[in-house]
Amino acid sequence: MKSFRRSAALWAAAVLILGGCGSTGSDDGAGKSSAGAKVTVEFWNIATNEPLKTVFATAIKDFEAKHPNITIKNVPIENDAFKPKLTTTTQSGKAPDVFQTWGGGVLKQQADAGLVKDLTADTAWIGNFTDAALAAYQLDGKTYAIPHDIGMVGFWYNKALFAKAGITEPPGTWAQFLDDVTKLKGAGVTPISLAGKAKWPGHYYWAYLAMRIGGLDALKQAGDGKDFTAPAFVQAGQSLKQLADLQPFQKGFLGAAYDTPDGQAATMGNGKAAMELMGQWAPSVQSSAGKGIGDDLGFFPFPTVDGGKGAVTEAFGGGGGFAVGATAPAEAVEFLKFLTDSTEHRKAVESGGVLPVLKGEDDAVKDPNLSVVSKNLSGATGFQLYLDQAYPPAVGQQVNDSVAELIAGTKTPEQITQAITETAKSE
């Protein structure tokens, strides 16, 4: 994969009060443990669905077999519950030994607070990763987390339902997209599945529209100036309101979660909606939460907006990585090295659970849908990290909340940009 330009704005945040770590065993308080001592390492992750659920369980078993003095306490937490749980833990001054991170402003806040280890010294290990995969976890020239996945958000669609509505090819522009939504509704098909309760899936629409209308520079300027009231952001809201006014989402979407049996992924995976805007993990979650639609599943990038400055080759997304708590024992780093070693990580790629983050792994991608995502990434001319990760937690949460209110029809495009700006300026 090519190296992408990151446009995420990273701001400083208030320092949190530090406390103890989640590990047990012989630890001198500085993250080092006595050789041969029994040590337990807590591993917080979001692998509650297959295939990563089994991939991680197997990796832990293999690691413990090679390191009988180390026990890995596997703590898988559902995605929507993970973020608030981690926030509560870090606000108390604690951090798990090894934990899921998406990098960006959230990781920067944790680094500024002294809650995570600086992993820069492991230069030989870090050198195995692609520049694009590492970008979200490198702050001020230092590396604070290790990537495990990378990808982009795009539209996953049901080819059979498109054909039922007489749609012969994916839309290339926002106007064509809205026209296709109307065609799908006319054919008795629910156009889009959305997890309104989760909120974060909805922010993908507003973020992508802002990118396509204002270009990546608009997002960078908004981040630097802490001002989201520029015309591009208001217009993004107006375009999203156009979509919401068509009532394209499944019945009860405002109360729908993402990966539950009646949530967004299952609705799509059971063939009850024609599209969902989601990351590269979508096919596996569709099959885990629902039945999966097999060969009927396709992918297309977010359309361009007529007159907009953004290109279809500019991607929005990120990846999943793992940080190490500042007071975690040395064994935590050892486990993370094992988990992201080329031999071990290739198993995760081959399972279809993640995309390559290590050099020379591209041939391990077996799923044709993931190959399409990988190809789009390879041709990307720009890259924007998820807005709820690019910015400090309070700003990211405000983006999610405000966009959810816009989709629900309770706030106007102008009101949400003002609310996001007010929160940004307060940080």
Image (cartoon, rainbow, N blue to C red):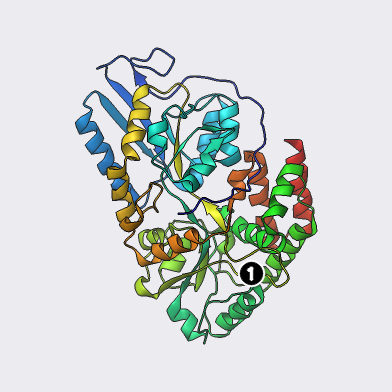
Q: Quadrant of residue 30?
A: top left
Q: Quadrant of residue 336?
A: top left
Q: What residue is disc 1 on?
A: 304
Q: Nearer the viewer, residue 129 or 285?
A: 129
Residue 213 located left or right of residue 149: right
x and y percent of residue 419 in the render? Answer: 76, 48
* Residue 195 in the image, given as x and y percentages of width and height: 54, 59
Q: Is residue 422 above or below residue 244?
A: above
The disc labelled 1 sits on which kind of residue?
Answer: Thr
Is residue 41 placed above or below 200 in the rendered structure?
above
At 73% from the left and 43% from the top, the residue drawn is 224
Residue 411 visible at all: no
User: Where residue 343 sits: x, y (%)?
Assistant: 27, 44
User: Which residue corresponds to the image point at 66% horizontal and 43% vertical from the top-left?
Assistant: 9
For the residue labelled by badge 1, is the local secondary structure a helix, a strand or a loop?
A: loop
- Crowd rating for badge 1 (residues with CA inside 10 Å; few <14, some 14–19, many 20+): many
